[in-house]
Image (cartoon, rainbow, N blue to C red):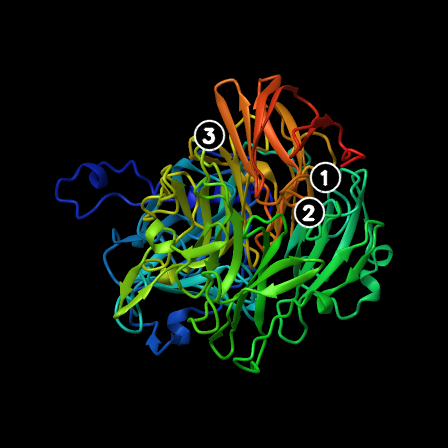
Amino acid sequence: MTRRLALALLASLLAACPSTDDDDATDDDDATGPPCGSAAGDDPGLLELSWDAGSPTTSLVQEAWSIYGIDLVDVPVHEGVAFQLEHPALIHAVMVYFAQLPEGPDDTPIPLGIYEDFGSNGFDYTWWQADWEGDLCLGAVTTDAWQPYVLDEPLGVDAGLVHVAHLRQGATDTAWALDTGNSPDDCGPENDCHSSVHLPEHTSGDDYYAWNGLSFPIPEHYTVRLLIEYVDVIPDEQRIFQAVPGLVESIRASWGDYDGDGDDDLLLAGPQLLRNDGGTFVDANGTSGLAAMPTVQGEGGVFGDYDNDGCLDLFVYKGSTLMGDHLLHNECDGTFTDVTVVSGIADPQQYTDCSEFNFPTFSATWWDIDSDGLLDLYVANRECYADSVWYVDLVWHNEGGGAFSDWTGTNGFLGFGDAPTPSISSVAADGDGDGDVDLYVSNFRLQPNLYFRNDAGTVSEVAEDLDVQGEAVSFQESVYYGQSRSATWADIDTDGDFDLIQANLAHQRYFDFSDKTQVLLNDGTGHFGDAQGSWGTPWSNLGIRYVERPWTPVLHDFDSDGALDLMISAARGQPTEFYWGRGEGTYIHSSYEAGIRPSDAALAAADFDLDGDVDVVTGNAIYANTAAQGSWVSVGLIGNVASNRSAIGASLRGYVGERVLLRFLSGGNGQQDSLYQHLGLADGTQVDRFEVDFPGGGTVSFEGPFAAGQRWWLMEDGTTTSGWAPPADR
């Protein structure tokens, strides 16, 4: 993409642009249409954005393109170009090189529009509603020079994708020129191609059933250029999240203090274990013993102390039937031992040999199903994509002594006699507030999600009863739900109970019958309703933007103002979105200010540098939070009576004046946030009281005050202490 000062170019635009001062054109009552063209003042700060090399050679009409059996020459087609803006901008003008112009009188309008992005895939936009529309008169344009569309008033747009497009009605209508000499060989991942075509008439029928019409990128560049002025520029070094030195390449990430020194260590795909030494990360695969375990390979893992010895163990899942999952025991000296065989945990999937790449274990969650003080394990298995075979999720009950028994198909769980599900994530919390921990399972392939409500160790699958299975949409005699990716629990609206946010993939072509990302608010009785409202535009009622491929949501108080903020990762180069929370469930989009680069699915949160704010890791970087902070406390929980030692599944409530701040300790959703809980107090100076619902241990109250600015350790036996490191007698 070229970027250069365009003072001379803009001057030429003004000379070429047709006048709008002709009284006959503007005042004649018999005029057939509005005047064409516009003018704008000179501005030396403009930049020219383009993908082409300035060598128009052909057009879709001349090439007689067809796709999916459709002749693109004869049908209405939107020709579009996407531009990636690095900062918020004012658009002053658009330049176009035409390959073909229609027949007609000189005042025939040649229209063009600027459109908001729709989904971040690089080639879909709000074709039905332009942010700006303008035209030139046929008599003032040619096919042998750049033609200017200069806006009367500059159009303000956010950083990110913006689209320029026009509608060609058929073979004899206006056609943009293509520059095939400077085009990619193919489109590859999203955003690698920058030009696109969209067929607005192909929105219904057995072959074309999409609400948004049929659209696709093309591996040539339309000769279209954008003249912009960057405004409200935030330098990279002033963004909220600053990448720390070091390369991260991972599709999953989990935080856990495996060495018990009070700061969180990091597990990445591989597995790659990074020990946190005072905010500096050190490769620990050698010292931990992982390097000596060649069969232990995996895309992700989750931390949990399954034997209650005070040291976090690790379950590593592979994401392939070629190599199995592994349970690694922490020896409390910084090393792990592979105990998979002696534990009894296995992942037999014998439906198919799978002819291609496979997705068996895609997530795992530690949780104490029967409140016996021992962490159990739910293993979410996805599918054999090539053979369209789905797998059965496995449930492993902790019997103590390092042994697990298979509870799949028992105690209310689905089993091999039930229909398999393409499970992609699972996450556990006390959703109904009855003292035991429930489980939510996200299913892919437009299948309903699952909710296992826990009743003292026996579960019931009640997703439909609680309205969390996804929105059922009937189409062609079938019922479809969402393509759910990952979910998490949080008190989104600060009303004292756990809500769910479910990130759903929804392709633009299937937009009418796919669930978009849902914010499922708990009504206080354990029933839920999606508060997102209509998705007829790129924005929901809550202020969350539609992205095609969202993956992992995290909710944390990133500025310690007492309201949970939201970050959602995405796959295939689409943006990681960031929102400031208002506290009542609505959000302010601030992805530009956040400065998180696009990554692939990975996202997990922890205060890794112990400076009192919540940091994150993505698929390509560890980011330190630099936002201005209110007061805060950090909380570590220890189960030392009846609960599991790491207190996974516990509900924590902090009472700050009239406010109640609710958190849960996650056993993972395929990835894992820190078990240390961050509570933002805004301008408060203390927490008046804590309450903790320990799984299997009941509710324990801790009377304060607990001063801000430090970590407090709350133990199930009612004792407390402060300090970053765990108490020595824990």
Work out how far the residue at label 1 is from the one at label 2, CA to CA, in angstroms.
Answer: 9 Å
Mark in the foreground, 2 or 3: 2
Three-letter code, disc 2 = Trp
First in sequence: mark 3 vs mark 1:
3
299 relative to 261, above or below = below
311 relative to 234, above or below = below
191, 725: nearer the viewer: 725
Marks 1 and 2 close (CB-CB < 8 Å): yes
Residue under numbered circle 3: 583
As helix, strand or loop, the secondary structure at mark 3 comes to loop
First in sequence: mark 2 vs mark 3:
2
As helix, strand or loop, the secondary structure at mark 1 comes to loop
Is 291 positioned to the left or the right of 8 in the image? right
Q: Position of residue 311 (x, y in %)?
A: 75, 47
Q: Position of residue 183 (x, y in %)?
A: 56, 66
Say which residue appears at 77% left-offset and 49% top-offset.
246
Residue under numbered circle 1: 608
Residue 255 is marked as 2
As helix, strand or loop, the secondary structure at mark 2 comes to strand
Q: Position of residue 614 (x, y in %)?
A: 64, 36
Three-letter code, disc 1 = Phe
Q: Quadrant of the C terminus?
A: top right
Say which residue appears at 62% left-offset and 67% top-offset.
319
